[in-house]
Image: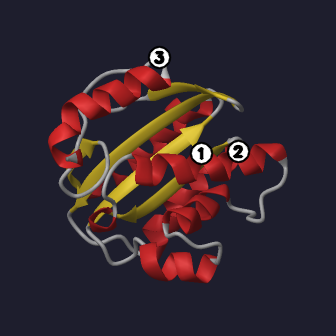
Amino acid sequence: MRSQVIRLASDVGELRIWLATLVLSRPMNDELLSRVKSIISGCRDSLITIVPARMILNPWQMMYPAYLSLREHLMGVSRFRDVGLGALTYMAGTTQLRRGLSLLNPVGHDQVSIIIMGVDDCVDRIISDVIRVLNDRIMDAAIGVGIHRSYTGGIFNTIDEFINTLISRYIGGLT
């Protein structure tokens, strides 16, 4: 599962992105969420965002807001101390953290979508640590996001390659 890291060139460096939807044996709770979120502490140029899978329609609904939040953080203009929470608010379509959490809080959900994004080599370690922390609760996992979506391809070298693959795999869902 860890080998499915997407690599995209961007204006802030090469992004490393991992998207997954997990079915957990028990719903996510505050303690587990805190443990997962604490993994990011040693990697300041990375983020983790976890949301209920049923609220996500496609990978772009997580990737673009995460990119915007990470870019603002790297440029030093972010309004959020936690870059992952910044991404969550953008995913919810708001700039208010309280509103974003009320719409996309993963606590109480047993099907969650996760995005890990960064511009350094920490991403591989973060993915391993997240899988290790959640391992005893994971009943099923799919690369990709959303309750009915998954992607099982490989590593992408360009944004065009990624978009072409998305279009060819999900054209039925887009039309």
Q: Name the residue under label 1.
A: 67
Side of 14 relative to 74 (left or right): left
Residue placed most toward the observer, 141 or 129: 141
Disc 3 versus disc 2: distance between alpha carbons?
20 Å
Q: Position of residue 137 (x, y in %)?
A: 27, 58
Q: How many marks?
A: 3
Side of 84 relative to 163 (left or right): right
Residue 4 in view, yes or no: no
Residue placed most toward the observer, 102 or 160: 160
Q: Where is residue 175 in the image (x, y as percent from the top left)?
A: 19, 47
Disc 3 element:
loop
Amino acid tagged 2: Arg
Mark 3 or mark 2: whose residue is earlier in sequence: 2
Disc 1 versus disc 2: distance between alpha carbons?
6 Å
Identity of the residue furthest to the right in this view:
76
Determine contact: label 1, label 2, CB under 8 Å: yes
Disc 1 element:
helix
Residue at position x 31%, y 50% from top?
Answer: 145
Q: Position of residue 52 (x, y in %)?
A: 34, 67
Identity of the residue furthest to the front in this view:
175
